[in-house]
Image: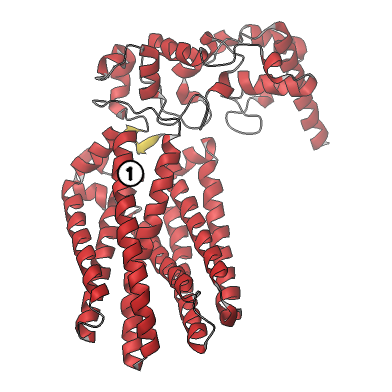
Amino acid sequence: MEYPFWDTAASYGILMAVIAVVHVFISHFAIGGGLYLVIAERMARKRDDVMALEFLQGLSRFFVLTTLVMGALTGVGIWFIIGLLNPAATELLIHNFVWGWAAEWCFFVIEILAAILYLYGWKRMSGKNHMILGWIYFGAAWMSLFIINGIITFMLTPGDWITTGNFWDGFFNVTFMPSLVIRTGISVMLAGLFALAVVSVRKASEFKARTVVQNTVWSLVGLAIMLPSAIWYFNAIPDTIMATAEETLTIPFITYGWSFYLIAAIALCLAVFGLAMRKKFVLPMALVMMLLGLAWFGSFETFRESIRKPYVVTDYMYGNAVVVNQVEEYQTAGMLPNLAYQTGDDGADLFRHACRTCHTIDSYNALKPAFDGTDEEFIAVNVLNTHVLVGNMPPFAGTEEEASMIAAHIYKQTDQRSIKEIYGLSGDAFGEKVYDVRCGNCHVIGGFNDKAETLFDMDKEELLELLEMAGDLAEEMPPFTGDEEEAEALADFILKAKAAQEGGQS
């Protein structure tokens, strides 16, 4: 935790996603594009196809400039943003894989040089030597993917590295190979989509129709690699991670499901636009498929990032940069003594380091709506027991006093009126809102940690008595600090939910 903080109105996750998804989208079609160019050039030279060679020369100019400039800029952007958002995790990845990064940077330099020489060598080199440069470019780009893939997959499945600390145990982890195959397939598919976008602006001709079909088939081959390897990747993730996520998280599985719908949508568009309508293929069709490809990448990367929650490196470091074996120490000695950079506002400093990585007060993953209409005591118990809340959060690495400091910091930024005043609700809607605020952080009816079966066995009087003693039922459970009207509305809501369930079963 030897680093300052960075306050920003935007979510850390959104900032990372915007830069990272764009970068990996560009870098993957750079890899696939290298393979596409050299194979297409070989075929064109074999047929002595002057038009195809001319097209490939133009494609390589647009392709190389786009990937080298935008890829390099967004790549630097990723290092910049992760260094700001989670310096401790960045330091871990650099120190543990320092020779891997060094090798990757060497391959990147080779990739850049080969790409530039390939671009300017069309009319200055023999066909044989030019294609050798193309293979060097692709090989260096793919080796960059190979190395970065090992480091990225390590974050989800570090495996034996947790106990051995061995470079190779972390690098060749259980998701390494399926991830490498799926990313290779993605690269192939994106290269085809990119080539379709370039050829789409040409005037209708026999050459354009033929090239559209060629690029479509190329993209479909990439999809054919992606689909089984996506299933392989999903099944390679350890059962413990999947079971925890299935119980506590929804986003990973929503995005994973969407990834298959998007694969189907891309395949359909390729079949319709690239094959059936090849003679009428135009730029808007290509852009639709490029956007679908970007959306697919977003869904896949969201799944990969969210499935490992609450860790940044599974079983080793939590998302807020607290190392797992430090938690007990911080719970005893406190987090504040371990913060090298402090502003004097202890509550704000603790919030930044314990919560800010995933939560803002009033924007992304906002805490204000969750605590509007409550009080400091209620918030403090929630902070102290984050490990039992909805969403698979890490345990609070601090003392009870520090939880109260964070609660005070959050409370002063919430709406301190009653829930009824804030939302202007009445009847069933009011009772449901009270349940969501007072109980829904830990108990979801029909979902996470559902206590409906127990509650439905009680009448209204018993429910009201239960609320009075709520804080004594379990150490993790906050007392019910709402007023009498809220208690009545909450009890009525539970009884209505019970009647609805019984009506649905009859």
Q: In the image, what residue occupies the spot 47% across and 32% down?
A: 392
The amino acid type of the residue labelled 1 equals Met
**Secondary structure beneath label 1:** helix
Indicate the colouring scheme: secondary structure
Determine the image quadrant of residue 483: top right
> In the visual, does 431 lie left or right of 116?
right
Picture quarter with the N terminus: top left
Q: Between residues 41 and 389, which one lies in front from this camera angle?
A: 41
Disc 1 residue crowd, few under 14, some 14–19, many 20+, Cα 10 Å: many
The quadrant in which the C terminus is found is top right
265 relative to 401 in the view: left or right = right
Residue at position x 39%, y 13% in the image? 347
- Residue at horizontal 49%, vertical 78%? 202
Q: Residue at x 31, y 67 (%)?
A: 64
**Residue 145 image-quadrant placement:** bottom left
Note whether 109 is above or below 90 in the view shown. below
**Residue 49 visible in the displayed image:** yes
User: In the image, residue 433 lies at what x, y percent?
Assistant: 68, 22
Q: Name the spot of residue 425 as percent of width and height, x first.
A: 75, 20
Of residues 238 and 357, the one drawn nearer to the viewer in this rendering:
357
In the rendered image, the vertical position of residue 404 relative to residue 138, given as above or below: above
Can residue 238 be seen here? The reply is no
Disc tally is 1
Position in image of residue 319 (x %, y %) = 37, 33
Question: Could you tell me residue 75's position as x and y percent?
Answer: 31, 51
**Picture layout, residue 407 above or below residue 182:** above
Q: Which residue is mark 1?
A: 155
